[in-house]
Image (tube, rainbow, N blue to C red):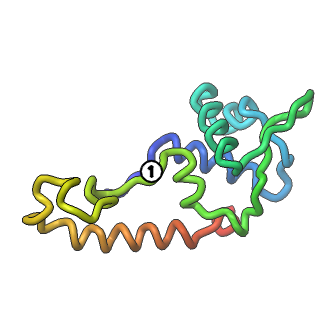
């Protein structure tokens, strides 16, 4: 039921690659794309988003590329996901608490139980760090 987008998947692969012991701290989009068979153009856009959210920094020069700016022990999966896709919800009404956002808000029988599941998902991704999956 719950599925991560390809953008999030590719971003997580790239960030995990940069956090793995023994890997060069700085990696180019091309290096990562080639190693994991990820489309280069898409990966470049994802890495730019991660840079914009100050999860990655860029290094210029011959041995340049991207590097993690945050400690993997402090970088949560939610921070990575939200930087790439923005916040997402399993229900469209998940981010709203009023009837203006949904035409069936008053009679909906899914909203309450699925919001509970959404809170559990959010809690998991907000408490799981990159270091835990490296």
- Total marks placed: 1
Q: Quadrant of the N terminus?
A: bottom left
Residue sticking out furthest to the left: 107
Residue 45 on image: x %, y %:
60, 32
Position of 118 with respect to 106 (left or right) is: right
> Which of the 4 image quadrants contains residue 70?
bottom right
Q: Quadrant of the C terminus?
A: bottom right
Q: Is residue 119 left or right of residue 64?
A: left
Question: Where is residue 78 drawn, in percent x and y?
Answer: 54, 60
Q: Residue at x 69, y 31 (%)?
A: 34
What's the residue at 60%, 38% (across, down)? Answer: 46
For label 1, the SS is loop
Nearest the camera: 47 or 25?
47
Residue at 80%, 38% (x, y): give it: 58
- Taking depth in this image into account, of 125 and 2 the one nearest to the observer is 125
Q: Nearer the viewer, residue 91 or 102?
A: 102
The residue tagged 1 is 4
10 Å neighbourhood of mark 1: few (<14), some, or many (≥20)?
Answer: few
x then y, percent, for residue 33: 67, 33
- State left or right for residue 1 relative to residue 81: left
State left or right for residue 14 relative to residue 123: right
> Can you name the residue that lies furthest to the right here?
62
Residue 128: percent from the left, percent from the top? 58, 70
Please tell me which residue is depicted at 38% across the width and 71% down the height of the picture: 119
Q: Is residue 126 above or below residue 15?
A: below
Q: Is residue 33 above or below residue 95?
A: above
Which quadrant of the view contains residue 126? bottom right
């Amino acid at each position: 039921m719950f599925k991560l987008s390809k953008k999030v998947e590719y971003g997580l692969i790239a960030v995990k690659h940069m956090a793995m012991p023994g890997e060069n701290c700085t990696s180019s989009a091309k290096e990562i794309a080639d190693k994991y068979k990820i489309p280069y153009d898409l990966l470049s856009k994802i890495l730019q988003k991660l840079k914009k959210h100050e999860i990655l920094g860029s290094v210029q020069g011959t041995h340049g590329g991207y590097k993690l700016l945050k400690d993997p022990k402090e970088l949560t999966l939610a921070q990575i996901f939200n930087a790439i896709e923005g916040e997402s919800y399993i229900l469209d009404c998940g981010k709203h608490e009023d009837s203006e956002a949904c035409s069936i808000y008053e009679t909906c029988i899914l909203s309450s139980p699925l919001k509970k599941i959404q809170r559990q998902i959010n809690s998991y991704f907000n408490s799981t760090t990159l270091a835990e999956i490296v």
